[in-house]
Image (spheres, helix red, strand yellow):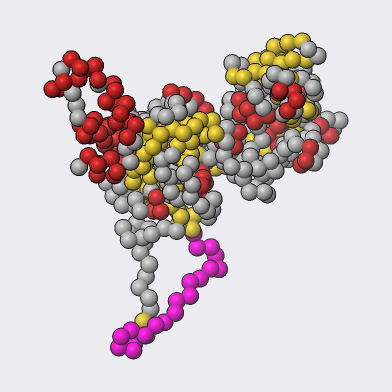
Amino acid sequence: MATLLMRRFQLPVILTAVLCTLVQPLGAQNPSKAPSSLELARAVEQVLVDAIAKAEKSVVAVASVRKELPGESFQFELRPDAFGRRTFPAPSPAPTDPDFIPNEFGTGVVIDRQGLILTAYHVLGAQSEYFITTHDRKVYRAWIKGADSRSDLAVLAIDAVDLVPIVLGDAADLKKGHMVIALGNPYGIARDGQPSASWGVVSNLARKAPLAPAGTEPTGKATLHHFGTLIQTDAKLNLGTSGGPLLNLDGRMVGLTTALAATAGYEQAAGYAYPVDDTFRRVVQQLSQGREVEYGYLGVQPMNLSAEETLKGLRGVRIERVVAGTPADRFGLKAGDLITRVDDAPVHDADSLVLEVGKLPVESVVQLDLIRDSRRLNLDVALTKFPIRGEKVVTVPPPAWRGMRIDYASAGSQSDSPTSGPAPAFDDGVLVTEVEEGTPAWQAGLRPGMLVRQVDRATVRSPKDFRSAIASKSGTVQLRLAGNAADHSPLNVAPGS
């Protein structure tokens, strides 16, 4: 029995030996009460069972069904039955039918009793409808509440009540060798709402996602996870487990799994999960509200140190270029500066700089430790907004003002890399992103792409500045533009009718 149990759960012999070592003092005092190897194995088994039972009611199966586009039609071939009569094939089961097998599937976790489901963004297919199957075998049609490509996270909503939210842990407590459990929907087999389990250990931390295919993003690093956030585990993560929880032995979610190897078309021993940390919680909160997730942006082109420099003991990342008009430029960073720390986090290379800055909210003030001409300096810099290249879903956008919406000027930049063309032009001001035709803003001549530098006589550098400047104004407001339109006459925006 013990042999079968160990083989079934792949319990390492060394684990049993360690447990025996831990209880040796007790056995030495009273040998008759020393637990047997089988009892120790069963104790470990019970811990796994309890952790799974605590979390599995919060795990759901996600099915993605592509919508039939206009002009598409399905051709059915008439086939004779056993009596020679021509019959139509039986209709395919509906997505709410237990026999329905989706061609795209994944996993999700309940994060709110009132029907909010967290999953991985890449689980969601384009032009698709979504269906959620809960642990009690109920099937719900779902819609996207919010989605963010930079974190690869998305929140779906269903018309349900009294769901069981997952209990969040903290990935900061994880160490190599910690035992973890993964729950998911491998190959869509959990479409009855009963997730499958696998277990293993934390193999490593702060791993980097494989580069994205060329063409989707110039650098191949489309998400924060490409810069070194991932939990690596040897728990089996097959295709379809993306979006499921990675649990600690208390049954708390410390990561959201992603089947990176499986989605690339092959299996490998390494599985990965997005860590539950401060950035994860902030992103989930924003997506749950249907709002856009914003990330900090410094405005530098970083360059790794040479091998010779690192062998001499030098640490940090050098600034190759400062983008004009960005916080790096405004607060005095220069090409050639060597950044060694961002707040309390040491910087080892270009990726770690991008990660430490990028995971912070917009307008965060960061302290940079740097070396300039052999002198050590500390510089406080207020971040602006990183320009997201991937698609995002925002169901609760910021309110429009007189028919127009604005954003940070940096949000209009697609790249600060010299390989992607000339450096973007930044000016003090806010970017006009939307203008509805026929509104006062449209009639005043405002169009998407313009930069607003002043509201009446107040200079605005951020959406917060803009909202503060127009908050108490009820009459005609004068807007002065920046950039190429700075020399034009101010635009007068009348109040709406």
| Residue 177, position as x, y percentages in the image | 42, 29
Q: Is residue 282 above or below residue 121?
A: above
Residue with the most extreme left position = 32
Q: Is residue 220 above or below residue 89?
A: above
The residue shown at (64%, 35%) is: 405
Q: Classify residue 289 as left or right of residue 191.
A: right
The residue shown at (18%, 23%) is: 34
| Residue 260, position as x, y percentages in the image | 51, 45
Q: Quadrant of residue 207?
A: top right
The residue shown at (39%, 53%) is: 188
The residue shown at (52%, 53%) is: 265
Comparing 386 with 48, the one in front is 48
Comparing 70 with 435, the one in front is 70
User: Range of the magenta residues?
Assistant: 67-85
| Residue 228, position as x, y percentages in the image | 57, 32
43 part of magenta stretch: no
- Dominant secondary-structure state across the stretch colored magenta: loop
Comparing 297 with 180, the one in front is 180
One can see residue 286 in this view? no
Residue with the most extreme bottom position = 84
